[in-house]
Amino acid sequence: MQIQPKASHFIDGEYVEDTTGEAIEVIYPFTGEVVAKVHAATPAIIDRALTAAARAQKEWASWTGTERGRVLRRAADIMRERNHDLSVLETYDTGKPYQETSVADATSGADALEYFGGLAGSLTGEHIPLAGGDFVYTRREPLGVCLGIGAWNYPTQIASWKGAPALACGNAMVFKPSETTPLCALKVAEILHEAGAPAGTYNVVQGMGAVGAALINDPRVAKVSLTGSVPTGQKVYAAAAAGVRHVTMELGGKSPIVIFDDADLENAVSGAILGNFYSTGQVCSNGTRVFVQKGIKDAFLARMTERLKGVVMGDPQDPAVNFGPMVSANQRDIVMGFVKKGVAEGARLVTGGHAIDGPGFFIEPTVFADVTDDMTIATDEIFGPVLSVLDFDTEEEALARANDTPFGLAASVFTKDLTRAHRMAAGFEAGTCYINTHNLAPVEAPFGGSKLSGVGRENSKLAIEHYSEMKGVYVAMTDVEAPF
């Protein structure tokens, strides 16, 4: 399979290169080898992308919603047909196992394109009758050029999650992927163009923070949608606010999983695995603070330790491998720093805790017990395969401690008492909550956080509100009265 893209950027319906931009090496996390190279966007590339998007947006918005939806649904079909190749590329880009990327990445992107393609034709306004025969009608209109800024953990999915609702509403998009995983978004742009989107409707430019800042501050950008860390989100939000731009911020978290004594043990362990070790722990909504009621704690730790024997590390392109490397050497080192702090601050290391020698950026799945709320591993987002178990006695205590964080992305509860489950879900200060599961994100449901974890929602019908605005038109059917 060809890993090196045809060019660094996809602009106005074609691959575009400008080698005067800073070189960005694509490192395969399994081997540590350079497998591709792209170049950061120069000012000329940025201008070219925004110019193309602004022009294409007017044409795209003139299409009916049904016509736009047809293109998005066609793109979804192409993405599913090419799922294997896209999954292999995603694995080279991120290091995530093919066993995972083949069912969770391009497939999720295709779901978003299909879902919002189906919604596009239904985006209408309403008629509001008034006294005397006057009335108001509303028009749902696109915002214009939308800027998407992606994270490195789900490059295909994020490019699609942002692009699908934006395009359904009649916007154009310029997408800047993470410099760590720059390859997959180019394929999303290519597929959308092949499916019939006008040239310039979806553009991809590469680069680091300086490129993102140049895009955010350009007056042609009407909307900024970021997936990233809280510190990055604060900077992007402030820059967007200076231009009074619309924003969606999907940021980090330190999400709780609360497991009561009466929970189904196997399901609770499965949920904690999904919430801590899927994607090698590199998921923003991970439930890394696992509150376990004392009566089930020993059984939970024993079963978790046993289940982790099923981890298969190795070549992530091998379908039998279910646990891949960290995305980069830097991320591995950051996570290992947290592991060392956990030990130093008195947490009990139950299993794991070591980096694996040899090529690739592997870390063992790591479980800490006897963690207290003030330990660094319980307060800071780690973004790696580190699970912290905290004891609790009562429901009230668990809810209060679960909410005692500046983050609010996700939260889950495991219990057979459904009245208690719904009480907990209502009490969680988080935008995305789960009962007896964790970390599922169907496109039909809203996804996003509260508090420092973000603003706005991705997916579901709610995303339409973040990529469009309502125009009210007052129609007078009688003479106009004035005081003089």
Image (cartoon, rainbow, N blue to C red):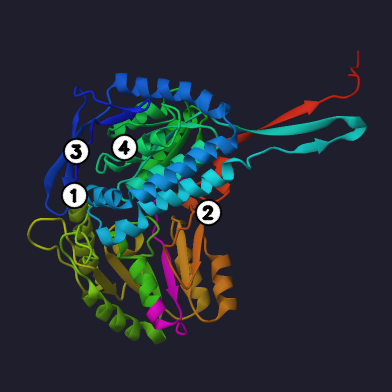
The residue beneath circle 1 is 330
Left or right of 428 on screen, residue 148: left
Mark 1 vs mark 4: which is more N-terminal? 4
Q: What residue range appears in magenta? A: 249-267
Q: Amino acid at mark 3?
A: Gln
Q: Secondary structure at mark 4?
A: helix
Q: Secondary structure at mark 1?
A: helix
Characterize the local packing of mark 4: few (<14), some (14-19) or many (20 or more) Cα atoms within 10 angstroms. Answer: many
Quarter holding residue 61: top right
Label 4 to label 3: alpha-carbon separation? 11 Å
Figure check: 376 above or below 168: below
Label annotation for residue 186: 4
Figure check: 132 above or below 101: above
Left or right of 260 on screen, residue 269: left
Label 1 to label 3: alpha-carbon separation? 23 Å
Q: Amino acid at mark 2?
A: Pro
Mark 1 vs mark 3: which is more N-terminal? 3
The residue beneath circle 2 is 446
* Residue closest to the eye, 204 or 430: 204
The residue beneath circle 3 is 4
* Residue closest to the eye, 280 or 112: 112
Mark 4 vs mark 3: which is more N-terminal? 3
Looking at the image, which residue is at 48% across and 41% down?
A: 72
Mark 4 in CB contact with mark 3 (< 8 angstroms): no
